[in-house]
Image (cartoon, rainbow, N blue to C red):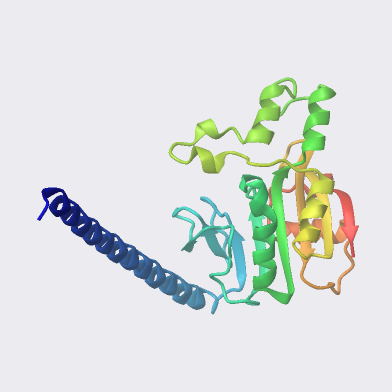
């Protein structure tokens, strides 16, 4: 037999063997992922026996009475999971999904998908409460009007950078995740909510804790028309149940879609 043919046949045999090993490795990996997902769902079913409220993107903050979820394992997490997709939870199983300082870390194409995923997992009377993401219009205005700064005398470019980018240099090992991926104003938030299927919501601005500058945004959105009347007085009391970071007296309602 021609030596060249022998070499070719030998190489083909090696390639076939490599393909088999790669395919076997892929199957084992896929099986392991499926088993891991099954275990995670079983764990979530146990957690749901105690609460149907989720704290999404919890980071290091553990909220009592919530299932605390984050993409990385911390001392606060009950479930380590990709926060963009809550399909690991049973459909229609959640009454509340709360998140603070999370929304701005999503890529532009993931924002609607995330809210749609939450919509699917909410009970009919369920709600989503998001706080802690910057209002770019307010941030820009604070800079242009040379407002008093939060960490220095003036609201300078570093202030703008902290709100638009998140100042990710202070974290070690997860710089990209800490980086703010998108910016918002009330029109952008309303458009995202509507695209995700929400028709009943209130969008607002507020000052963080004891700060004076109203540059931070939040919203409360319901899966179906709520029985309550959404207004500023209701919102102040409602938000206080979730976060002490929102200075209630500073809340300014931007949009109400009842």
Residue farthest front in this picture: 2
Where residue 172 sits, quadrant-wise, is: top left
Q: Position of residue 56 (x, y in %)?
A: 59, 58
Instruction: Looking at the picture, tell me which residue is in the foreground, 141 or 155.
Output: 141
Task: Please give the count of numbered marks on the rendered protein.
Answer: 0
**Residue under the point 69% across and 47% down:** 132
- Rendered view: 251 above or below 37: above
Q: Position of residue 73 (x, y in %)?
A: 44, 55
- Rendered view: 20 above or below 89: above
**Residue under the point 60% across and 61% down:** 55
Viewed as shown, does residue 201 lie left or right of 4? right
Quadrant including the C terminus: bottom right
Instruction: Looking at the picture, tell me which residue is in the foreground, 27 or 174.
Output: 27
Q: Is residue 23 visible?
A: yes
Viewed as shown, does residue 37 lie left or right of 238? left
Q: Is residue 147 visible?
A: no
Q: Position of residue 221 (x, y in %)?
A: 78, 63
Residue farthest bottom in this picture: 49
Q: Position of residue 207 (x, y in %)?
A: 77, 41
Quadrant including the N terminus: bottom left
Where residue 165 sits, quadrant-wise, is: top right
- Rendered view: 172 above or below 151: below
**Residue under the point 85% across and 72% down:** 225
**Residue under the point 49% across and 60% down:** 81
């Amino acid at each position: 037999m021609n030596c060249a043919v022998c070499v070719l046949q030998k190489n083909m045999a090696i390639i076939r063997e490599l393909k088999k090993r790669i395919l076997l490795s892929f199957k084992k990996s896929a099986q392991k992922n499926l088993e891991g997902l099954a275990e995670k769902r079983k764990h979530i079913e146990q957690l749901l026996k105690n609460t149907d409220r989720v704290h999404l993107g919890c980071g290091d903050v553990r909220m009592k009475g919530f299932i605390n979820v984050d993409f990385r394992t911390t001392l606060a997490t009950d479930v380590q999971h990709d926060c963009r997709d809550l399909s690991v939870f049973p459909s229609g199983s959640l009454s509340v999904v709360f998140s603070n300082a999370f929304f701005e870390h999503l890529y532009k194409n993931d924002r609607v998908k995330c809210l749609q995923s939450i919509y699917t997992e909410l009970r009919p009377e369920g709600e989503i409460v998001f706080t802690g993401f910057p209002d770019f219009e307010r941030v820009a205005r604070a800079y242009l009007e040379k407002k008093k700064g939060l960490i220095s005398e003036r609201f300078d470019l570093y202030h703008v950078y902290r709100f638009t980018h998140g100042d990710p240099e202070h974290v070690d090992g997860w710089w990209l995740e800490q980086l703010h991926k998108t910016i918002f104003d009330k029109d952008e938030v309303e458009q995202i909510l509507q695209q995700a299927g929400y028709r009943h919501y209130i969008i607002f601005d507020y000052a963080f804790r004891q700060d004076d500058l109203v540059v931070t945004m939040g919203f409360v959105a319901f899966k179906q028309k709520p029985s309550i009347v959404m207004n500023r007085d209701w919102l102040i009391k409602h938000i206080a149940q979730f976060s002490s970071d929102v200075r209630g007296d500073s809340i300014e309602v931007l949009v109400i879609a009842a």
